[in-house]
Image (spheres, grey):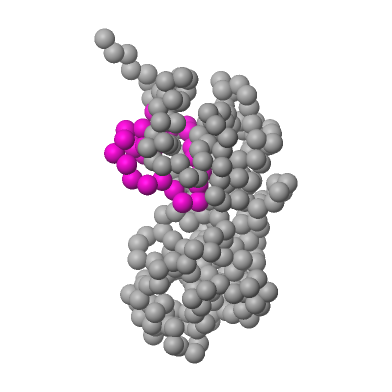
Amino acid sequence: MLKSFKIFIYKPNEALTFKSPVESLFYTSLQDSPFLTQNAEQAHLFFVPFSSDLSTRSIARVIRRIKEELPYWNRTLGADHFYLSCAGLGYESDRNIVELKKNSVPDLLLPCFSWVKPKWSSLVKELVNDFEFLIESEPSDQLTYRQRLTSSKFCLFEYGGDVSGIGEAFRFQCVPVVITDRPIQDLPFMDVLRWQEIAVFVHSKSGAEELKRVLNRTYEDRHEQMKRLGVKASQHFVWDELPQPFDSFHTVMYQLWLRRHTIRYARREYD
């Protein structure tokens, strides 16, 4: 992969700004990596960069320009193109946005750092007054936060919240418990990590007593193994200024490498 995988980056019309340092770091790392090619004919995949604060309408204009100026999008309807973001794209009826969301390389969620507080589920609200659980409305300072991770057997996460905390939980041997109402489809690195072996998934409507039964059973049967696997998984959540093997940047690139084989649509000729 390191020697043969090539990515072409479309040149943006204006300087890019990123709300997330992770998005900025990925873009800089890709530009400085051996994966970059200036020859689009050599590329396996095409990266569509856009600023974090662009509206969906502005992103649609970016795609329209790409389609009009260069032939590569039209060869595959965008199937060998990809974009990355922490927040994803909103829904829009514009054909260019629909094609980008539907046809581009899917489900590559960046493990970003964010302290935005998610909406509490009914289960978390039920646990607030339970002495066996520590539920915070605001994040702790880093020292206290890590001390609590180290001393806890399980760490609760609301699905859709800050996924960078899961990487921290793995590092400090606290098994993540992900509370969700729907099937898990977009956790980071789903092509690489066997999430069912390193995290517990529970329904938000399970109730506190059912959650305790699940956690007690997990602790008795496989907690130690999940901790060991989680520590190994934690390396994939590290963002280095100079990318290192197995860190977040290289894990994203490996996912792209796995998905590089795309269906190429024949170009249609119109009368």
Q: Is residue 115 visible?
A: yes
Q: Is residue 82 above or below residue 120?
A: above
Q: Is residue 79 above or below residue 248?
A: above
Q: How many marks?
A: 0
The answer to which of 94 and 216 lies nearer the viewer is 94
Which residues fall within the magenta stretch?
A: 76-103
- Left or right of 233: which side holds 242? right
Q: Is residue 175 above or below residue 17?
A: below
The answer to which of 219 and 98 lies nearer the viewer is 98
Identify which residue is drawn at 63% across, 61% down: 234
Identify which residue is drawn at 42% across, 36% down: 59
Which quarter of the rendering shows the C terminus?
top left
Does 69 lie within the magenta span? no
Q: Residue furthest top?
A: 271
Q: Is residue 264 visible?
A: no
Residue 142: x and y in percent read: 65, 71
Does 87 lie within the magenta span? yes
User: In the figure, residue 38 lies in which quadrant?
Assistant: top right
Residue 191: x and y in percent read: 51, 50
Residue 175: x and y in percent read: 56, 72
Residue 226: x and y in percent read: 57, 70
User: In the figure, residue 73 lies in which quadrant?
Assistant: top left
The answer to which of 102 and 64 lies nearer the viewer is 64
